[in-house]
Amino acid sequence: MATTQQLQDFTQQVRRDILRMVHAVNSGHPGGSLGCAEFFTVLYQDVMSYSTDFTMDGENEDVFFLSNGHISPVYYSVLARSGFFPVEELASFRKLNTRLQGHPTTHEKLPGIRIASGSLGQGMSVAIGSAVAKKLNGDDKLVYSLHGDGELQEGQIWESAMFASAKKVDNLIATVDLNGKQIDGSTDDVLPMGSIKGKFEAFGWDVLEVKEGNDVEAIKAGLAEAKSRTGQGKPVCILLHTEMGNGVDFMMYTHAWHGKAPNDDQLASALEQNPATLGDY
């Protein structure tokens, strides 16, 4: 079990990785990546049971699926710093003929990546399929997934949600990054969804909320509570309230950094706010 300080230090280094990766190629999605840095850190450093001797089937280990694949910078950083591939490989992000493309892919066999995720709305279907397979195989480990709140505007999500409840897929914990923002503005302005909690509950899910989604201790507690609710006949959903661009003052409270890279001066300011803790790649 990691200490709070260890989780915070890990998160801060991940933020530096995200900023430097996106800046280096003047491309990528820093906002949502920064907002989910604490979640990925806690998931991989404290919660999930997994092996870095990676296999696609994930037999007898917890598995994770990223549905909103554009936040690949945070995913790659945490996978590398958790031992799946060399940290130095982060320098190849979004470059031609490398394994670290803007959206995760599987054809290059990057350890840790089990699905190609670019088109939104599909990750929950895959996660549910994996969870059903675990049940059929007598595997008692869990399946985790992450989804953007704007992604919930996609219809396939709700087909999947209906199936998961009907088939009692109770070894699945799906987390929604509830930051209220997407590429064109706030989710309420683009396409209001009403009560997301009410919707998942109406679809037969067990729903809990983590109000402080950028606090490692709150995330730990929320994931522990979610895990305690598995195996009771319902899929579990965590509504994780995060701040897009968290940890960088000029990237917070706006959707502007959903898919925009910082310039040299902005990078320097952002890195000054997040001094190195584990060493840069």
Image (cartoon, rainbow, N blue to C red):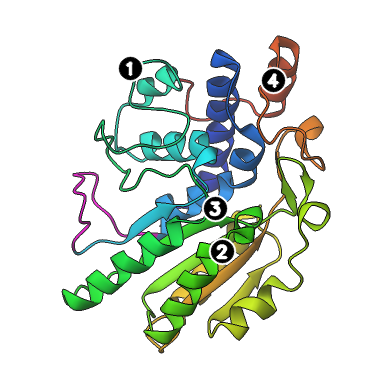
The residue singled out by tag 4 in the image is 262
> On residue 39, which mark appears?
3
Q: Could you tell me the amino acid type at mark 2? A: Gly
**Prevailing SS of the magenta stretch:** loop
- In the rendered view, would you say 6 is above or below 179? above
Q: Position of residue 38 (x, y in %)?
A: 57, 48
The residue singled out by tag 2 in the image is 155
Q: Quadrant of residue 155?
A: bottom right
The residue singled out by tag 1 in the image is 97
Q: Which residues are magenta?
A: 48-59
Q: Nearer the viewer, mark 3 or mark 2?
A: 2
Say whether disc 3 or disc 2 marks the residue closer to the N-terminus: 3
Say whether disc 2 or disc 1 marks the residue closer to the N-terminus: 1
Q: CA distance from mark 4 to mark 3?
A: 23 Å
Q: Nearer the viewer, mark 4 or mark 2?
A: 2
Identify the residue at horizontal 81%, vertical 30% (top origin): 250
Q: Position of residue 68 (x, y in %)?
A: 52, 48
Q: CA distance from mark 3 to mark 2?
A: 25 Å
Q: Nearer the viewer, residue 190 or 197?
A: 190
Residue 220 in view here? no
What SS does tag 3 mark?
Answer: helix
- In the rendered view, would you say 99 is above or below 59? above
Q: Could you tell me the amino acid type at mark 1? A: Asn
**Is 157 on the left-hand or right-hand side of 65?**
right
- In the rendered view, would you say 36 is above or below 263? below
> On residue 237, which mark appears?
none
Q: CA distance from mark 4 to mark 2?
A: 33 Å
Q: Residues within 10 Å of mark 4 (few under 14, many from 20)?
A: many
Cβ atoms under marks 1 and 4 closer than 8 Å: no
Q: Could you tell me the amino acid type at mark 3? A: Phe
Q: Nearer the viewer, mark 1 or mark 3?
A: 1
Residue 213 in view here? yes
